Image (tube, rainbow, N blue to C red):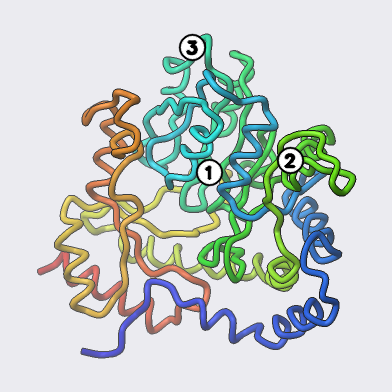
Amino acid sequence: MSSSVPFLDLVRQHRSIRKEIKEAVGGVLESQRFVLGENGRALEKAVAKYSGTKFAVGLASGSDALYLALWAMGVGPGDEVITTPFTFFATASAISRLGAKPVFADIDAKTFNLDPSQICSKITSRSKAIVPVHLFGLCCDMDGILGAAKKHGLSVVEDAAQAFGAEYRGRRAGSMGDIGCFSFYPTKNLGAAGDGGMLVTSSAQRDQKVRLKRDHGSKIKYHHELIGINSRLDELQAAMLRVKLKYVGKWNAKRQRIAARYNEAFKNLPLQIPFTPDGYQHAWHLYSVLSPKREALSRFLEIKGIGAAVYYPLPLHLQPCYRSLGYHAGDFPVSERVVREILALPMFPELSGAEQDRVIAAIRMFFKR
């Protein structure tokens, strides 16, 4: 068998910017300032500008960003928060950590994102917020979601963990709701060398609330105004992310070219390829297709030495830890069909033309056998 095509290869990206990364890390080590320093402040300012918001707050993870965003919007015990069952677990766990209840609504069959038409039937007197997830790098239908939120007086917290640089009708992901949340987990389009996250908002009040909460509720050392947590983006991560931020636009453009090539190659196959509505700019964190023959296709690609992965195999409403919510198989038919059929193919900026050729040839071979 010829050499494999990896699903993801972070080493290639690092090699392309190795010198800058070493200099950035070396500068932090020389300063011996590791927490809440100049790199973190500079990154916050740059991400706010990039996102089109007034403020950004560096945090320890994207999961903490969601938690703190919902906390800042007043979500607490007894409240309900509407979101999608087809997303990474952190979306729902942030709600649960606050003592609130995740309430799921089904997804759109073409975009895999929260379907605005499904939201209103889920709203009750306890509803407090909506968390749309810009899944795989594609923004949700934010006009529909914001319209529902405004009608019912709900907050909107954008889970943009997978969508750094994505756009919806000229607006960047994270800038449209009350608060936006990013993850800098290493595999993301803008990835750190470990965990990291950021929250963006244009509200000075929310910005200050989160800054206080992330640092043990303290403005003056050893004086605590509230019971906070420890969720600070460290200087080493911030320094590396400042380097990578300069390149993320170029990297996303490469992802878009790869996705366009895949789309053209697969358009006549019995395969549902990703759909990007007019006026949207996809960030292509993942390139995922649907096939009723997903398991056979996955095995075939493995034999051919081509990486693939399933995001996500079990929807949130059927997770063991959420049995108490009372959901059952069949409650969200679109999400449940998607988890049975979805498969993500190799997608990263450094994926070579020859590797793309191999992916395309293998997919075509599978369906023409």
Task: Determine which of the numbered discs, if any, sits on residue 344 in the image.
Answer: none
Q: Residues within 10 Å of mark 3 (few under 14, many from 20)?
A: few
In the rendered image, which quarter is residue 8 located in? bottom left
Left or right of 39? Residue 336 is: left
Nearer-the-camera pick, 12 or 224: 224
Left or right of 286? Residue 319 is: left
- The residue to which callout 3 is attached is 124
Circles 3 and 2 in contact, beta carbons < 8 Å? no
User: Which quarter of the rendered picture does the N terminus lie within?
Assistant: bottom left
- The residue to which callout 1 is attached is 278
Residue at 38% over, 84% down: 354
Question: How many marks overall?
Answer: 3
The relative height of residue 323 versus residue 235 in the rendered view (above or below) is above
Circles 1 and 2 in contact, beta carbons < 8 Å? no
Which residue is farthest right?
220
The relative height of residue 317 versus residue 349 in the rendered view (above or below) is above
Amino acid carrying label 1: it is Asp
Mark 3 element type = loop
Work out whether mark 1 precedes mark 2 in sequence or the reverse, and give the earlier one: 2
Mark 2 element type = helix
Work out whether mark 3 precedes mark 2 in sequence or the reverse, and give the earlier one: 3
Mark 1 element type = loop
Task: Determine which of the numbered discs, if any, sits on residue 213 in the image.
Answer: 2
The residues bearing labels 1 and 2 have C-alpha atoms spaced at a distance of 39 Å
Amino acid carrying label 2: it is Lys
Nearer-the-camera pick, 239 or 177: 239
Amino acid carrying label 3: it is Thr
Q: Position of residue 64 (x, y in %)?
A: 60, 46
